[in-house]
Structures are given as structure tokens and as C-alpha cells.
Amino acid sequence: MNPYEESDAERSFDRRRRRAGPAPVKDVTAATFMAEVVDGSFEAPVIVDFWAPWCGPCKQLGPILEKTVRATGGAVRMVKVNIDENPQIAQQMRIQSIPAVYAFKDGRPVDGFVGALPESQVKQFVQRLGGGKGGPSPVEEAMAMAKEALQSGDHKTAGALYAQVLQRDPANLEAVAGNLRAMIARGDLAKARAALDRVPKESAAHAEISAARSALELAEQGQKAMAGASKLRARLAKDPDDHEARFELATALFGSGNREAAIDELLSLFKRDREWNEQAARKQLVKFFEAMGPTDPLTLSGRRRLSAQMFS
């Protein structure tokens, strides 16, 4: 794919986004519950999230529900009910514990669950409610195209598509992480660092964000080390047991995109002296694997080779 200002994929996503219109997530009260939920469910299924500010699991479930509902492009709607402020609704719906989720369709509750579910089950719940209408949502299509562009090396198009998703759903952490990876791949490390610093603290531990952070740190380290790569090679030619030089060379290689050679250098270092610098070679390999992702072929082969050395 050639980089250009706006790809066909971007234009297609933008058209579908405009057609779909907003997929609102609203706060409702006793005064608006009938109109937004009961009457509104005749137009589209409505998910009701019963929550409270003191409820920890509610804070985990709420963002997942919102992201999944927004991804339907309006096929499913969502409202939130704070039970502390609206106890009469909770009493009428016989809410005994939270988070509690009810789905309304054609004016009556048709499905629901209690407790925080994993994202995969939330997605199944929402898709079941929507009846699978319209196939993949515009956001899902854009995410798939962005991942494909990133994997094929078209980092400009990938970044543009991730940016489109984030305009619609700023809390989509997979899109945030993908956008970070696109910046890193283009060499926009300062821009990627600034974007990473804007990620909310409560989202910092998300697996995709953590992997992008590792990739950025390695790219930053590699950028500094690449300037002296020739000197590092000369040091190793003179002394193959110069562990510091081999470690820095591996970091430089990884940061420049030569991932396989970087892994080879660290495995060689681990084989020569696994305890050097508090097992620095093993720890850096683990960081490489995190940055590449658990399903990357180099991660899988690298882990096998490291395990073979560790237990030999």
C-alpha cells in the first residue's frame, strides 16, 4: 500500500460513521427513564447500566460496556442509572447488587446480567441484543484495516485510521495503542511519548498500552544506541565477552527494526553469562516479547529458545 492523505478505507469508514450517527450513552433519572428506556427501546435496544460511584466493579464494567455499545454504530443504545441518586428506579427494577445490567427491547426487559463480566462476554451480550444487524460496525472495520496496514508496513494509513477511530471513541485503548505503534514505526518518538503521557493512569496497565510503552522505551533506547553501533560491533570483535556492548547492540538493533538479530544477540549473551547484571539479558528479552505481542512468530520462537537455554 502507498501512503497518501486519505485512503479508500478511511473514506469508507468516514461515510459509514456519518450514516450511523451518534451512539449516545446517557445518564437518566426517574423523570427521563420512561422516555429514554421504555419508549426508546421501540426504536433500538437499550442497555441500562445500574451503578454507583462507590462500586469498584462498576468502574471496570462501565467503560467496557460503553465502548462495545458505541462500536455498534447506533444499533444498540445505552443509559446509565446512578442508584444513589435514583433509588426509586432501583427499587422498581428490584436491583439487589451492582453492577447490574438490563437490556430493554420493544418496551420491556429481555436480557441482563449482574456483576462485572470480561470484555468478550460483554461483546457477546451486546451483539446478541443487536441481533448481529449490519455486520461489523464501522469502528470494527476501521480497526481491522488499521491493524492490516500496520502489519504490512503502511504506518501512515494505519495512524490515520486509528485517529479516525479515536475521534469517535477516545477511550478505545486498542486504538490508542495502535496509534502509538504507528507513531513509533514512523520514528515519531517524541509525539508518541507525548500521546502516551496523556493516557489516563487507570488505563496505564492495559495490556495493549503496556506493550506499546515497552515498544516506545525500546525504540528510544535503540535510537540512542544506534549512533554508536559500529563502535559496539568493534568492541565485540575485539572481545566477544564484552557483555555490555552486546546488550547495547541488541537494544540498538531492536529499536531500528532488526528484531531477529536483536533476539539472537541477547540469547547469545544469556548463554555466555545468564547472571550478568542481574539477568539483564533475560529481562530485556521479556521486554522485547511484550513489545512484539504474545502471538508474534518471533515472540513464540524466542520464548522457546530462551526456555531451552534456561532448562538445559
Image: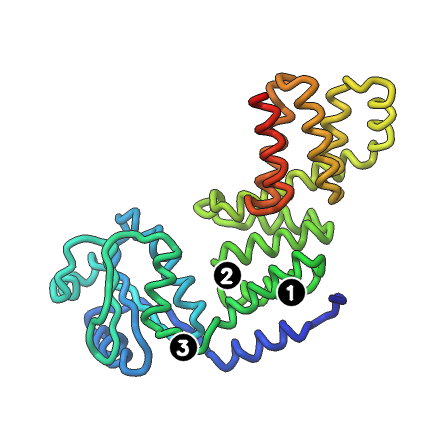
Q: For the residue marked with disc 2, what is the amino acid?
A: Pro
Q: Position of residue 236 (x, y in %)?
A: 82, 23
Q: Position of residue 14 (x, y in %)?
A: 58, 76
How far is disc 2 from disc 3 in space, using C-alphas?
A: 24 Å
Report the mark closest to the observer, 2 or 3: 3
How far is disc 3 from disc 1 in space, using C-alphas?
A: 27 Å
288 above or below 232?
below
How far is disc 2 from disc 1 in space, using C-alphas?
A: 14 Å
Q: Earlier in the sequence, mark 2 or mark 1?
A: 1
Badge 3: how crowded within 10 Å, few (<14), some, or many (20+)?
few
Mark 2 sits on what residue?
Answer: 170
Badge 2: how crowded within 10 Å, few (<14), some, or many (20+)?
few
Determine whether, in the image, residue 104 is placed left or right of residue 300: left
Image quadrant of residue 23?
A: bottom left
Of residue 253 and residue 301, the one placed in the foreground of this image is 301
Mark number displayed over residue 160: 1
Mark 3 sits on what residue?
Answer: 133
Q: For the residue marked with disc 1, what is the amino acid?
A: Ala
- Residue drawn at 72 percent across, 32 percent down: 264
User: Which SS class for mark 1?
Assistant: helix
Q: Position of residue 157 (x, y in %)?
A: 68, 64
